[in-house]
Image: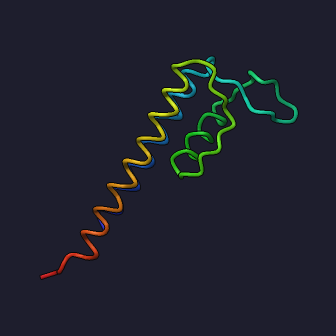
């Protein structure tokens, strides 16, 4: 159970960190077409929405990167998510498959 909690905590911390980084770098992004909004009218909720969808593995983002820094930030977030999921699967398989004494 503690492994499950640690995994959940890591996912939550990753969402918060990358959501804040997207907010800090919001000038490097524009919004996809959203009705009733300007393309550069980015809210903090848009940044955290992008962070949650990437961390969940959906991959859909309403933020379009326009600089190398923003592209690298998105790539690092995606790689972090992939790495975390691989580790999570490894640890869970070791816990559930390994013989218990």
Judge whether 80 appears above or below 88 on screen: above
Residue 49 vs residue 72, the one in the foreground: 72
Q: Residue furthest left?
A: 101
Residue 74 vs residue 34, the one in the foreground: 74
Residue 100 vs residue 76, the one in the foreground: 76
Left or right for 76, reference 46: left
Left or right for 74, reference 91: right
Judge whether 53 appears above or below 18 on screen: below
Q: Position of residue 24 (x, y in %)?
A: 54, 21
Judge whether 98 appears above or below 15 on screen: below
The quarter holding residue 25 reads top right
Q: Position of residue 75 (x, y in %)?
A: 49, 34
Q: Identify the image quadrant of the N terminus.
A: bottom left
Q: Which residue is drawn at 50% across and 27% down?
A: 21
Q: Residue at x 63, y 20 (%)?
A: 66
Q: Position of residue 52 (x, y in %)?
A: 56, 46
Q: Which colour scheme is used?
A: rainbow
Q: Which residue is drawn at 17% across and 80% down?
A: 99
Left or right for 94, reference 72: left
Q: Position of residue 77 (x, y in %)?
A: 47, 37
Q: Residue at x 52, y 33 (%)?
A: 74
Q: Residue furthest right?
A: 36
């Amino acid at each position: 159970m503690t492994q499950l909690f640690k995994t959940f905590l890591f996912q939550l911390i990753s969402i918060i960190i990358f959501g804040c980084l997207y907010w800090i770098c919001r000038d490097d992004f524009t919004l996809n077409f959203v009705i009733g909004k300007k393309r550069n009218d980015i809210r903090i909720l848009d940044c955290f929405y992008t962070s949650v969808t990437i961390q969940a593995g959906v991959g859909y983002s309403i933020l379009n990167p326009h600089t190398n820094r923003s592209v690298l930030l998105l790539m690092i977030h995606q790689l972090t998510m992939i790495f975390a999921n691989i580790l999570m699967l490894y640890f869970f398989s070791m816990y559930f498959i390994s013989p218990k004494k």
